[in-house]
Amino acid sequence: MSSPTKPNEPWDESTANWYATHYGDWPTTCMPIQAETWRPDEALVDIGCGTGSSLRHLTALCPQGRLVGIEPSPAMLAIAQQQTQQLGLGARIEFYCAAAEALPLADASMDSVLAFSSFHHWQDAALGLREVLRVLKPNGRLLLSEEPEILRLHGIILESLQQQLQAAGFSPPTQRLLTQDAAACHLIVARKPALGVLDKPQPPGHESAPAPHTQEAR
Ligand SMILES: C[S@@+](CC[C@H](N)C(=O)[O-])C[C@H]1O[C@@H](n2cnc3c(N)ncnc32)[C@H](O)[C@@H]1O
C-alpha cells in the first residue's frame, strides 16, 4: 500500500481528512527519522509536512530544536496544527502555509530540510531545490524520501533524482531503502556543500549578482 499518487492533486478538506485517517502516521513519516541522527538543538523544516506527524516525532529527539512545518494546503495545515495542539506540542512547532517554491525562511537558517513523500508533488522542482539550498546552512542536509511504488507510478528513476540533486548544487547524495512491515521508502540524503556552488569565489569580472534576501517569518 502506498500514499496518494496524483501529482498536484487538490489537497482540499476531503482529501486532507482521507489522508490523515489512512496515512497520517504511516511508517514512512517516521522511518527516515529513525535512520538518521539528530542534534538536540537541530533547526529543521519539513516541506509538505502533511499532518505534522514527522515533526511531532522530532520534538522528542530535538528538545531544544527549532522545528518548522511548511504546508501549502490550508486543510492539511489545519489538521497538523489541531493534532499538534491536542498533544500539547503547539509551542514546539512553527507551521506556515507555504510551498517548497517560496520558503518563508531566512538564508542559511536550517541544519536539515525534510521532504517526505512530498517532492513528487512540487510544482517546480528546480525552484524548490534552489529554495532548499538557500535556507540550508553550509553542510546542512536534505532528507528526501519517496516510496518505490510512487516513483514507479510517476516514472521517476532513482538515479535521475540523485543526478537532479547534484545538478542543483548538492554534494553526491547517499541512498538507502528503508522498510517496515508493508511500508517502504527510499531515503536520499544530500548535503549543501560547505562552500556552496553559489558561494564559490568567482574570477574577477565573473561575480554573480547577490541573491535576494528573504524576510524570515517567525
Ligand atoms: C503525500 S503527502 C505527504 C505528507 C507528509 N510529508 C507525510 O509524509 O505524511 C504530500 C504533501 O505535499 C504537499 N505539497 C503539495 N505540493 C507542494 C509543494 N509545492 N510544496 C510543498 N508541499 C507540497 C501536499 O499538500 C501534501 O500535504
Image (spheres, rainbow, N blue to C red):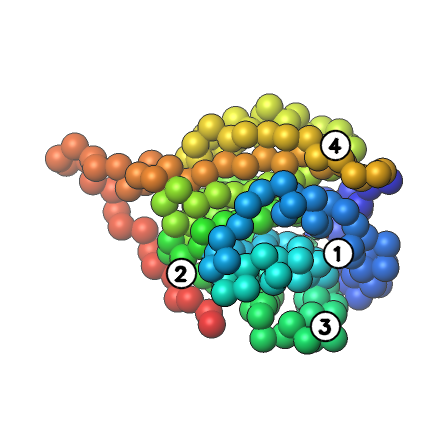
Instruction: Give the residue type at disc 1.
Output: Pro
Instruction: Give the residue type at disc 2.
Output: Ala
Q: Is residue 103 visible?
A: no
Q: Residue at position x 63%, y 74% from top? A: 90
Q: What element carries label 3?
A: loop
Nearer to us of marks 4 and 3 is 3
- Point out the image quarter for the N terminus: top right
Drawn side of residue 214 relative to residue 57, left or right:
left
Q: Residue at position x 26%, y 47% from top? A: 209
Above or below for 9 versus 82? above
> Is ligand 1 within 8 Å of the beta carbon of the residue shown at mark 1?
no
Are dots 4 and 1 in contact, CB under 8 Å? no
Mark 3 sits on what residue? 87
Q: Within the image, what quadrant is residue 11 found in?
A: bottom right
Nearer to us of marks 2 and 1 is 2
Mark 1 sits on what residue? 10
Q: Residues within 10 Å of mark 3 (few under 14, many from 20)?
A: few
Mark 4 sits on what residue? 148
Nearer to us of marks 4 and 1 is 4
